[in-house]
Image (cartoon, rainbow, N blue to C red):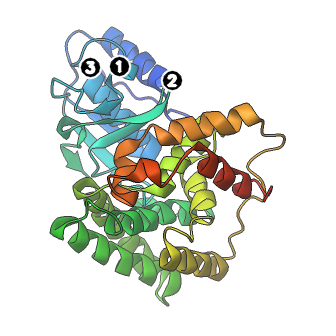
């Protein structure tokens, strides 16, 4: 049978478990047996979809059943990642982040990792601003969080330190766009490895809540959240603000109009249900150091209310 090609529009929303289930059903209906390979060409959202589809072709049930750590039992079909944006680390990470009916959480397991990747800086050359900035900041924040927490180690430190150096070259240095594209693509790869060996922290926990409830794109949500986290990452936030100024990036002044108390509580609930991130960032006693009230206060600051 002919190859099955699908353009998946992820502009309106981030990848969902329902999208994965629909794509898996389409692949199964296209031809008997399993495909030779699943190829994801695009940004982090497209690569996460490709990883999830490859896994769900060999694991029974629905994608939402596998949102969590090491729930995948069978290796997926062969899958290849081809990034056209640099920064997400999806090309190397062991997670396929999906929004489900109950939570935003990844299918995180060893079989999630791509079998092959193609890293070609020519493919990211036409990435528009400020998308390029927001995606690059995903890498920068990955590294700050990976290096700052209880789970960091020699592997994560080596990859994260080098990725931070490259991010600084790209967003604060004086190099050509071609050089910047090459360095950001390597930074993305190293940043993804750094968080694989360590963990993300406060920013990503809060960002998941923001994206799940108010549907902000991941890169933008990370930047909105990180800008309010000087209490947790003072040096990183100061440098991030310098990068924003250097590139003329202005964050949205508000998360949304008329955010309700229920929405704030829902965002806090999503964030608090990521204990591995909080433990990495704040230590084993993290429940004594962060609670719903403090998280809601941070979200209100992001919305210009305090």
State the SS at label 1.
helix
The residue under the point 21% across, 73% down is 158
Whether 17 is drawn above or below 145: the answer is above
Numbered circle sitting on residue 65: 1
Instruction: State whether residue 202 appears in this view.
Output: yes
3D distance between C-alphas at marks 3 and 1: 14 Å
State the SS at label 2.
loop
Spot occupied by residue 180 in the image (x, y as percentages of width and height): 44, 77
The residue wearing badge 2 is 102
The residue wearing badge 3 is 57
**Quadrant assignment, res 156:** bottom left
State the SS at label 3.
loop
The residue under the point 36% across, 28% down is 67
Whether 305 is drawn above or below 9: the answer is below
The residue under the point 63% across, 39% down is 215
3D distance between C-alphas at marks 1 and 2: 11 Å
The residue under the point 61% across, 76% down is 241
Spot occupied by residue 136 in the image (x, y as percentages of width and height): 48, 65
Q: How many C-alpha atoms fall within 10 Å of the one at disc 2: few (<14), some, or many (≥20)?
A: few
Callout 3–callout 2 Cβ contact below 8 Å: no
Please tell me which residue lies in front, 162 or 155: 155
Q: From the image, which quarter does the C terminus lie in?
A: bottom right
Spot occupied by residue 57 in the image (x, y as percentages of width and height): 26, 19
Return the disc, 3 or 1, that comes first in the chain's sequence. Answer: 3
3D distance between C-alphas at marks 3 and 2: 22 Å
37 relative to 272 in the view: left or right? left
């Amino acid at each position: 049978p002919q190859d099955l090609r699908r353009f998946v529009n992820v502009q309106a929303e981030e990848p969902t478990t329902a999208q994965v289930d629909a794509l898996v059903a389409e692949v199964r209906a296209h031809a008997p047996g399993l495909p030779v390979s699943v190829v994801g060409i695009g940004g982090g959202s497209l690569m996460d979809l490709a990883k999830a589809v490859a896994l769900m072709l060999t694991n029974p049930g629905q994608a939402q059943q596998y949102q969590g750590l090491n729930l995948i039992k069978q290796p997926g079909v062969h899958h290849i990642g081809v990034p056209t944006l640099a920064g997400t680390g999806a090309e190397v990470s062991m997670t396929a982040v999906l929004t489900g009916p109950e939570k935003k959480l990844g299918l995180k397991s060893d079989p999630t990792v791509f079998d092959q990747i193609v890293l070609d800086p020519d493919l990211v050359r036409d990435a528009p601003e400020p998308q390029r900035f927001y995606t690059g900041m995903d890498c920068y924040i990955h590294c700050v969080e990976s290096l700052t927490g209880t789970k960091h180690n020699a592997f994560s430190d080596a990859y994260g330190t080098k990725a931070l150096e490259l991010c600084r070259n790209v967003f604060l240095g004086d190099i050509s766009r071609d050089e910047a594209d090459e360095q950001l693509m390597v930074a993305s790869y190293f940043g993804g490895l750094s968080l694989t060996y360590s963990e993300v922290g406060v920013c990503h926990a809060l960002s998941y809540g923001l994206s799940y409830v108010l549907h902000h794109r991941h890169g933008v949500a990370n930047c909105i959240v990180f800008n309010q986290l000087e209490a947790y990452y003072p040096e990183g936030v100061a440098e991030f603000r310098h990068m924003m100024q250097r590139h003329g990036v202005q964050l949205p002044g508000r998360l949304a109009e008329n955010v309700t108390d229920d929405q704030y509580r829902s965002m806090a609930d999503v964030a608090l249900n990521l204990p591995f991130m909080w433990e990495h960032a704040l230590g084993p006693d993290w429940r004594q150091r962060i609670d719903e009230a403090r998280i809601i206060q941070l979200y209100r600051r992001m919305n210009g209310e305090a």
